[in-house]
């Protein structure tokens, strides 16, 4: 979580393009789930070589949270696939692309972020979820 907290908004042209692609691709994935907000934030931590995709919060009925949401796993899979694909595409276009990890963070609130998925992405791997 320290790496996530230290991540910054996109600064380079490649980061801005990747973030925009991810946000555009994530919108349809998040519009289907009943309780999840369709807001996605993409941040980067160059020191950790990690791209973070943060989504949430969810608004669930009293006494429930994301662990009770039957569609949550499909949401995470869709977002992870998009994140891995974007990182893989950037590796293909620019071998200097530094972000070899994609991490999904679900944020019920700013005080309670949770890492819900993580993938290593390399120059030669295909993205699989």
Image (cartoon, rainbow, N blue to C red):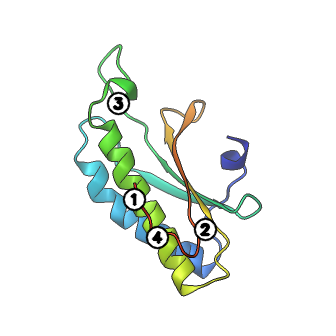
Does 31 appear above or below 43? above
Query: Element under label 3?
Result: loop
Does 93 appear above or below 47? below
For the residue pair 8 and 79, the one nearer the viewer reads as 79
Disc 1: which residue = 81
Residue 90: percent from left, percent from top? 53, 78
Query: Element under label 4?
Result: helix
For the residue pair 21 and 79, the one nearer the viewer reads as 79
The mark that comes first in sequence, 4 or 2, is 2
Residue 25: percent from left, percent from top? 34, 64
For the residue pair 34 and 82, the one nearer the viewer reads as 82
Mark in front: 1 vs 2: 1
- Give the residue displayed 58% in from the left and 75% down from the top: 123
Disc 4: which residue = 86
Disc 2: which residue = 10
Does 42 appear above or below 114? below
Residue 92: percent from left, percent from top? 52, 82
The mark that comes first in sequence, 4 or 3, is 3
Q: CB atoms at circles 1 and 3 under 8 Å apart? A: no
Spot the residue most to the bottom.
93
The mark that comes first in sequence, 1 or 2, is 2
């Amino acid at each position: 979580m320290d790496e996530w907290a230290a991540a910054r908004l996109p600064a380079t042209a490649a980061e801005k393009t990747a973030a925009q692609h991810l946000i555009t691709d994530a919108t349809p994935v998040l519009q289907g789930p009943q309780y999840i907000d369709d807001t996605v934030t993409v941040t980067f931590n160059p020191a950790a070589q990690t791209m973070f995709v943060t989504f949430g919060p969810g608004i669930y009925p009293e006494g429930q949270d994301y662990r009770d949401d039957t569609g949550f796993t499909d949401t995470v899979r869709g977002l992870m696939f998009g994140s891995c694909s974007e990182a893989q595409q950037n590796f293909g276009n620019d071998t200097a692309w530094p972000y070899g990890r994609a991490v999904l963070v679900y944020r019920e609130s700013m005080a309670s972020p949770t890492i819900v998925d993580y993938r290593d992405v390399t120059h030669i791997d295909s993205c699989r979820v």
